Amino acid sequence: MLTKDETDYLLKFEWLQKCAPAYAVKAENVKSLKNPSEFYQTLLEQCSIAKRRIIIASLYLGTGNLEADLVDKIKEALDKSPELNVRILLDANRGSRGKTNSSRTMLIPVLKSSYNCCVYLYHTPKLRGILRWLLPDRYNELVGIQHMKLYIFDDSVLISGANLSHDYFTNRQDRYIFIEDCKPLVDFYTGLIELLGSMSFQLTPENTLNIDPSWKYHPYKSPYKSYAMEAKKQLIHYYNSHVNSLDIDKNSDTIVYPLVEFPPFEIHNDSEITSKLLENAEAESTFNLATGYFNLPDVYTNTIFKKSLANFNVLFSHPLANSFHTAKGPASFIPTAYSCLTNNFYDQIKKFNVQNRIICFEYQRTGWTFHSKGLWYTPKNYKWPIFTVVGSSNYGARSLNCDLESQLVIVTDNKNLQNKFHTEKFDIFKSTALYSPDSEKLIAPLWVRFVLKVFKNYF
């Protein structure tokens, strides 16, 4: 039997309050959605009842019928509630892909219907000069993207790794944590998205891109250092201004900590805290780590192999569950490239002789692709996770080197919520099998291995 002190996990992770904003939430207001359909229906329902704000951050918006219905719901909400404000942050290059049909063209009708809507398109400052001229659509996204996935409705937020397109609404497994009635957390994310929006292009009803008059640097025409230094200064000031100690009283049972990773601006708050969580775990505790695109950077592998005493269940995608497995051209070899990376990781497990501590699993489900990512942490001699980490990061090299990411650490003493985390983890892991590299049938061509070696940070 564990004592009260041993189960007071909020206090054990109080050190996070020195590194990140902290917000108390009610455990009953934290819900884990189960599947893409529930994710989509929640988006539609929340748009229908939103009265004051709809704030969206995603990589892109698809162009199919389901996406069109979602846009219609946003328009209806604007028509119904004159005081409703809509802010949408997408990636400029991914959102512009498609000459006649793109995220931009999908959102033009919303912009034309209301002055209370702004569409921001973030363009990485690293894509500039001859590189921007040489790289075609799709490949220009390798340099860096807006990758956060946040869906805000009034004072509730749905944080996920899922984008807004047909596959993510139907047969691509992801994670979706919906937190209701938490105004301080939502205000933080709203301000963050609006700040990033001020540094981004703004879409006009004529489908052109403008720069906010208050922002004096162009993403790729101004000197990189000028743009990046100003962005870093403002983003760090904003984030740090929200880092305050939170009194953990007897009524608090769940605290959430938003983390950010903005590599173009040398902001690595998420990866630094994630590394500490992995390193400080007690012996014989367990991390379940999932990612759809497995390419752990050295900062994580060194921690897992050499510093952490925890056990790890590592889940990644089988090549047939990789979202690129039906791609054409060079992109069709992306699943093979990830197979190389998983094989290399497995070789390291054997090299360090930690097979009893680190176990690998592959997700495979007929007709489905795998995009879930996150952490679940279960202490020694305890049956449920006491915290989870959910958000956009794939824990891969490009998350630390290229893209804008945000995750949420949710720490709870509430047994019902711990059980929900356990059920969510179980549901994701039930479509898996032990990883066996000996059964791997895909053999990577020499050129794929060369590309991986040279461009590993972009996977």
Image (cartoon, rainbow, N blue to C red):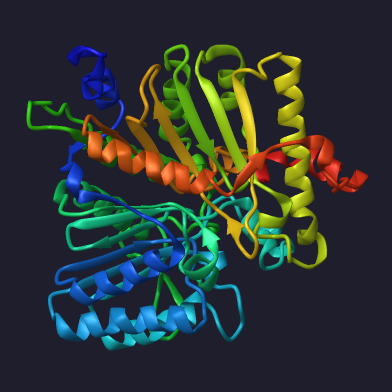
Residue 6 location (% of width, % of height): 25, 14
Q: What residue sits 54% from the left and 66% below the top?
A: 171
Q: Is residue 18 above or below residue 72?
A: above
Q: Residue at x 40, y 26 (%)?
A: 378
**Percent position (x, y) of residue 454?**
78, 39
- Check the image and report above or below for 89 versus 397: below
Residue 315, quarter of the rendered image: top right
Q: Residue at x 55, y 73 (%)?
A: 96
Q: Nearer the viewer, residue 264 or 295?
A: 295
User: Residue 8 placed where, x, y %?
Assistant: 21, 20
Q: Residue at 26% x, 14% y: name it.
A: 2
Q: Which residue in the rendered view is the most extreme toward the front?
A: 1
- Image check: 52 left or right of 162? left
Asked if one can make out residue 397 in the rendered structure from this viewpoint, the answer is yes
Which quadrant of the view contains residue 244? top left
Q: Is residue 417 above or below residue 40?
A: above
Residue 4 occupies quadrant: top left
Image side of residue 177 versus residue 347, left or right: left
Q: Nearer the viewer, residue 327 or 130?
A: 327
Apparent side of residue 24 relative to residue 377 in the rendered image (left or right) = left
**Relative to 121, is 17 on the left or the right?**
left
Looking at the rendered image, the quarter that the N terminus falls into is top left
> Who is closer to the viewer here, 250 or 74?
250
**Residue 191, position in %: x, y?**
25, 52
Q: Is residue 294 visible from the viewing direction of this image? A: no
Q: Count how many numbered circles sit on residues in the image.
A: 0
